[in-house]
Amino acid sequence: MEAKKVYKTYRYKNDLSWTAALKGTMAAAGHPAVGIGSPPEFKGSAEVWCPEELLIGAVNACLMLTFLSYAHHRHLEVGGYESHTEGTLENTDGKYRITRIAVRPVVSLRAEKDIPLAEEIMKSAKEGCFVSNSVTSTVDLAPQFTIAPSDSSTPEP
């Protein structure tokens, strides 16, 4: 009989405190506090992060970090990574929800021959991203790959 694989379980914590009107502060041990609140369209303020921005930002960040981790393990040299993300909040069945998250990374590579490997890694990153696997929104990933000038330096993973 084959042994069942045992997976680790991780827990993440943060604390929230209301400060005024539709604003608060989110904090976690060892991290700087973040001002949060309702977005302007829901009578909030543009000066703080709203939950909708944090949600799409979490998907965006997780996809980047997963891609970079996989690229490192596959020995793909990445010269740069920038990404724009947009979430669509809609009322469906009488409830507001983020229905779609469009992620548009631009990945700079060292050589054109690396594009097929980068595309494969990006596909694997989408499948392996913990955060996008946790949301019911459609995650639309449309990467672009460019070739970095030969004198670029690569940030450490």
Image: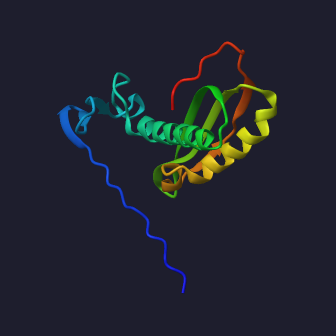
**Colouring:** rainbow
Q: Quadrant of residue 52?
A: top left
**Residue at 38% of width from left, 39% of height from top?**
51
Q: Is residue 2 above or below residue 82?
A: below
Is residue 150 toward the left or the right of residue 5 in the image? right
Is residue 32 toward the left or the right of residue 117 in the image? left
> What is the residue that sits farthest to the bottom in this orientation?
1
User: How many discs appear?
Assistant: 0
- In-front residue for pair 91/147: 147
Q: Is residue 47 above or below residue 36?
A: above
**Residue at 27% of width from left, 33% of height from top?**
31
**Residue at 61% of width from left, 48% of height from top?**
126
Q: Is residue 119 above or below residue 107?
A: below
Rendered location of residue 19, percent (x, y) = 18, 31
Q: Quadrant of residue 106?
A: top right
Is residue 21 toward the left or the right of residue 8 in the image? left
User: Quadrant where the N terminus lies?
Assistant: bottom right
Q: Is residue 52 above or below residue 108?
A: below
- In-front residue for pair 58/87: 58
Rendered location of residue 128, percent (x, y) = 57, 52
**Residue at 45% of width from left, 54% of height from top?**
95
> What is the residue that sits farthest to the top in this orientation?
151
- In-front residue for pair 122/22: 122
Rendered location of residue 99, percent (x, y) = 55, 49
